[in-house]
Image (spheres, grey):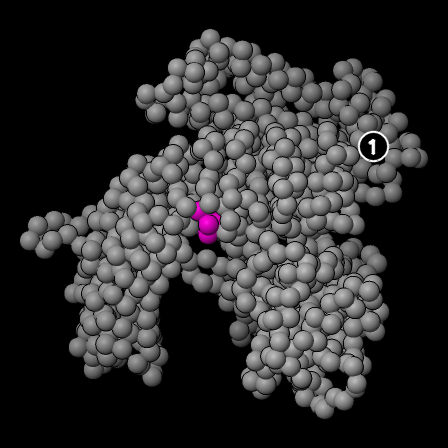
Amino acid sequence: MIKKTRRLLLCTQKAELHSYLNHFFLSNTSPLTQKKMAEAFAAEIAKSLLGKLGSFAVQEFRLAWGLEDDLARLEERLKAINAVLSDAEKQQSKKERIRLWLHMLREVLYDAEDVLDEIECETLQRQVVKTKGSTSRKVRRFFSSSNMIPFSLKMGHKIKKIIERLAEISSLKSDFNLSEQAIDCSHVLHEETGMNRSFDSFSGLIGRDEDKERIISLLEAPFKVVGAHPLVLPIVGMGGLGKTSLAKSVCDAENVKSHFDLNMEVCVSDDFSLKQVIQKIIKSATGERCADLDGGELEKKLEAILNGRKYLHLLDDVWNEEAQKWLLLKPLLSKGAGGSKIIVTTRSQRVAEIMGTVPAYNLSLLGQEDCLSLFYKCAFKDGQMELYPNLVAIGKEIVAKCKQVPLAVINMGNQLYGKTEEKEWESVRDSEKWEEEGDGILPALKISYQRLPTHLKRCFLYCSVFPKDYLFRDLLMVQFWMAHGLILQTSNPNEKLEDVGLRYVRELISRCFYQDYDDFTYVAIFKMHDLMHDLASSLAQNEFSIISSQNHQISKTTRHFSVTDSDSFFHQTLPKFPNNFHQVRSIVFADSIAGPTCKIDFEKCLLEFKHLRSLELMDDSEFEAFPERIDALKHLRYTHFGGNAKIKRLPKSIFKLQNLQALAVGFGLEELPKDVRYMINLRFLFVVTKQKRLPEGGIGCLECLQTLFIVGCENLENLCEDMQGLKSLRKLVIGGCDSLISLPRSIKCLTTLEELFIIKCKKLDLMTIEEEKEKKIQPLSLSLRIIIFAALPATFALPEQLLQGSAESFQTFIIKDCPNIKEMPNCINLKKLQNLKISDCSSLSKWCRRGTGEDWLKIKNIRKIMVDDDDSGEETSD
């Protein structure tokens, strides 16, 4: 298929193109006749390209280096073809010729994107050279006019080739009778009907109380089988029944937890690697990663952890049906004290037979009445159900199609939450997807996906590059999407891409594409159900791959992949498929890169990924320094190795990545050099450093930075004094910096700052940011909406000027575990403050006690007040 498609793309005569397209579909050997390709999303890519053509970097280059005509022709060609893409993508599910045409087009659009990114990279690098001032003669010569002429000629040649290919493909569109539609180059967010409800997803435990009590009884029952320690209770059932939710509910029950010294939870998933499972168990028990330990050392460590301790362990989502693997793990788990117990959740009866020491608990389908109750709770707002008896009746028919699978019921209910149009409910009930083979859950998930707007479909599918049970963080998820151009500017020029991306996250959560949502205010975390992951993987199969011990191949259509077995990747995939990496755009290493050979191979292979946009190293790897030649990845926009505690320094070359938008570095970093200022496109920075002071002329020069995390810096005493240079900063999180003494006064100059979180800084006195009172300097007008001060025992008073400057924007104020703060400042009666929460602040709580506290008059007009010394907990109206 690949060879045929490539030849098709290279055709130069329209007649040949028509002939070959007909041959492709008439051929009985075409894989498309057996298996449909995933959606191409050509319209979304075209919109992104049109946005790039209007960017400042491309505009500057096209005017300065004579590419005005070429880029104008490319823009004209894109607009012409984009006009019919919306109609083409609607028809692709039923017309294979259109589907193939869109996939051909997508490949050309990706190549066009690479060319425009080359131009952006060059422009940004020239911008940095200008700002450096005294630059070496070699660098100045590289960016001289004479050296730029070959580059512009090269780009012009590539653009002409792309225009020719677009013309060839565009010539076919008349054969499909596609209708033109108005071009909209921005994403319009659909009405988020679920946004006003709580994100506490319904776990599917409705109707499972009896199951829960039975399982607890089985755990409590005396068990006397020789050689069967520890007790292993399997919970078996098909996907979507709520096995995991039920098992977690059992483990979290107080009458269960109180019987054990240690509680652990590990998601095993598809690949049962003994080493990885042991690492996960140790991490669950102690928080340690232990990536640098070999198999024997890991086993000894696990034995030491379990020795003499009575534990309860949940092994979730087990698929391994090889008894030998379990027989290797079981002796290690038997080192716990008598009475230790393991709960295993699995879809396989064979797994239950291999691992169970007591009969499996077979989880049945949910009762029909419970299904209806669950659906109505998900689908209707409070009090709404009685108003729409017609929808209740349709809902009953929808529930019947879900075949008593809770996940399907929850998913369908959330899809219709807040919808009151009868036609919308009927479209779900009458969907042709219900006729496909499945047990109720797969058709339901497909309907959910089908109902997503196109931009959310792409975002969802890109999540399949991450392994199952991956813990997503909303801020990083958004940066990952941004790195791949999945988030476009809306019609509101004041709305940042980060805001749009967070709305995408919330909408996908409200539609049940993610679960286990937990909001910590400064960041939210969530996971993807393994069935949702299976759905995303199946739909994204043309572009996404997983390299594991079972699968170590990569195709020429693969643009995103994750590595769950580094040995397989470096020793089998990389040598066998060396020419299949140039098009790769994202890599996730879910496995540790350990050993000198793997480290060398990793450094070599990076040079193959010429168009890489995102790189993530999830677990500890044996890198003390990142590869020196990382600057070869000039398209890189997102890199995350926050879980790698051994990386002590960053190579100087990393600061040449002018395209980088997000950087998250781990807990071993000795220092963050001043050269970080050359990352002029950086929007997100998560940094942990062992420095005592952040130097001036570094972070403070990042004018594009929107989000800054400074956490776990145990030696840090002072931040940089030039923070006023952070002209775009909107979120600042400072946490776990126990040596931090003061904050710079320049923090009051951050006029764009909207969210400020200062947490767990033992020595920090917030009053250091106040000006001396005798100066009587008028505070700047600030934009702070949310402030959280928590675990600050050295702070005795709140920074009045900081609060006063935010009077017009201040909405939420949380003060927690600050025992020495005694009163609210006089300025606290702010105009827009809606939420005030005070907890674990003994003195302040007394002063703010409802009605009687000495500061009550200052705060009484705030709409919602929660003080831990206040038993009423009532809201007060303005």
Q: Nearer the viewer, residue 297 or 41?
A: 297
For the C terminus, give its image quadrant. Answer: bottom left
Where is residue 181 drawn, in percent x and y? 62, 34
Q: SS of the residue at dot 1?
A: loop
Q: Amino acid type of disc 1?
A: Met
Q: Is residue 202 magenta?
A: no
Judging by the rendered image, the residue that carries numbered circle 1 is 1
For the N terminus, give its image quadrant. Answer: top right
Q: Is residue 814 left or right of residue 242?
A: left
Instruction: Tell me if residue 32 comes above or below residue 273 in the rendering.
Output: above
Q: Quadrant of residue 861?
A: bottom left
Q: Is residue 508 left or right of residue 540?
A: left
The residue depicted at 83 percent of the width and 18 percent of the height is: 16
The residue depicted at 79 percent of the width and 68 percent of the height is: 327
Q: Is residue 542 left or right of residue 675?
A: right
Q: Which residues are magenta?
A: 664-669
Q: Nearer the viewer, residue 21 or 388?
A: 21
The residue depicted at 70 percent of the width and 70 percent of the height is: 332
Report the residue that reaches farthest toward the left.
Answer: 774
Where is residue 363 drawn, in percent x and y? 76, 76
